[in-house]
Amino acid sequence: MFAIKIVLFILVIVAAVAMSVKVGSVESRSGEKRPTVNVRIGGIIAGVIMIILMLVLLGSVGQVGAGKRGVVLKFGAVTGRVLGEGIYAVTPFVNSVEIMDVQVQAYVSQAAAVSKDMQEVDTKVTLNYYIRPAKVNKIYQTLGRDFEDRIVKPSIQESVKASTASFTAEELVTKRADAKRAIEKSIEIRLLVHGLVMETVSITDFEFTPSFKKAVEDKVVAQQQVLTEQRNLEKIRIQKEQAIARAQAEAESLRLQKAEITPDLIKLRQIEVEKAAIDKWNGVMATYDGGSGPVPIMDVFSKSR
């Protein structure tokens, strides 16, 4: 739109110059024709009027770009009229238009706070927010264009301080998600009051003093050692229980075997042994020299040769 205005203004100037000056020629005594330039007073006046009218026209016509809104002013005062995207025309010398951006904007702020247990905490907050299109006239009227310094930055600082004070330093680490939600909720409420909408909040890890970091590291190491010892004790307990269970199982097995031994079972086992011995006998009677002559004996339990 700005380029179109420049082109139109140049064309008007050219036309005004053409109306103000008349180029001609005169014949000299020697018969030669020389060019002449005659200034027209009436043309100059007409040209000036044309330039003024063009300036007035160009000043009353403009364009609202994508993602923006136009706040219409009347003699510098907010009228309540908001222009959408596209070309607009307003009354010259009476109305003017201030363009406000309603796209999502990012604002980064470093915030310092104190935790519930009086530990110093630093964090970096990145806020994505946008202006509610229907509230641009109010924001321009009450805050102007420096609403980030007047509203956004203080909202972040106060929200971080208030929310951080509700958690201990350790909880800011172990319950980081809860702390982040508390900060987001506080920022959202503070911005909505002024017509600003929170999109997202990104929080860099909370930073503590070097002495506190060292204390946390030592505590973590001690806790890991305790966990290791507990696991070792648990392993020993399980091994002991397993050994007791095996011994009990073996004792129970022996008890059951002993309980199954009866006179009938013993007699059956003897019969089975004798039968096996008879099956092994080759029919030859064994003898024993008792001094008065060989005496046959029944040696069914000897192995055959």
Image (cartoon, grey):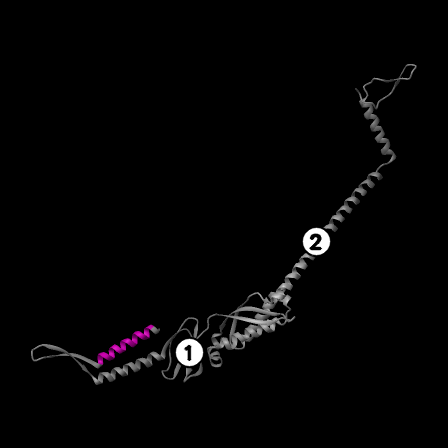
> Crowdedness of circle 2 by 10 Å Cα count: few (<14), some, many (20+)?
few
- Amino acid type of the residue tagged 2 in the rendering: Arg
Quadrant of the rendered structure where residue 59 is?
bottom left
> Crowdedness of circle 1 by 10 Å Cα count: few (<14), some, many (20+)?
some
Quadrant of the rendered structure where residue 281 is?
top right
How far is disc 1 from disc 2 in space, using C-alphas?
Answer: 69 Å
Left or right: residue 151 versus residue 37 is right
Q: At which x and y percent is residue 125?
A: 54, 69
Judging depth in this view, the residue of 64 and 29 nearest the camera is 29
Residue denoted by label 1: 98
Q: At which x and y percent is residue 190?
A: 55, 75
Q: What quarter of the picture does the C terminus occupy? A: top right
Residue denoted by label 2: 231
- Give the structural element (helix, strand or loop) at label 2: helix
Quadrant of the rendered structure where residue 230 is?
bottom right
Image height check: is 113 above or below 75? above
- Give the structural element (helix, strand or loop) at label 1: strand
Left or right: residue 161 versus residue 94 is right
Marks 1 & 2, CB-CB < 8 Å contact:
no
Magenta highlight range: 3-19
What residue is at 51 percent from the left and 74 percent from the top? Answer: 196
Judging depth in this view, the residue of 218 and 114 nearest the camera is 218
Left or right: residue 199 versus residue 176 is left
What residue is at 32 percent from the left and 73 percent from the top? Answer: 4
Q: At which x and y percent is residue 175?
A: 62, 65
Judging depth in this view, the residue of 21 and 125 nearest the camera is 125
Q: Residue at the far top: name it.
A: 293
What residue is at 9 percent from the left and 77 percent from the top? Answer: 32
Precedes in sequence: disc 1 or disc 2: 1
Q: Residue at the far right: name it.
A: 292
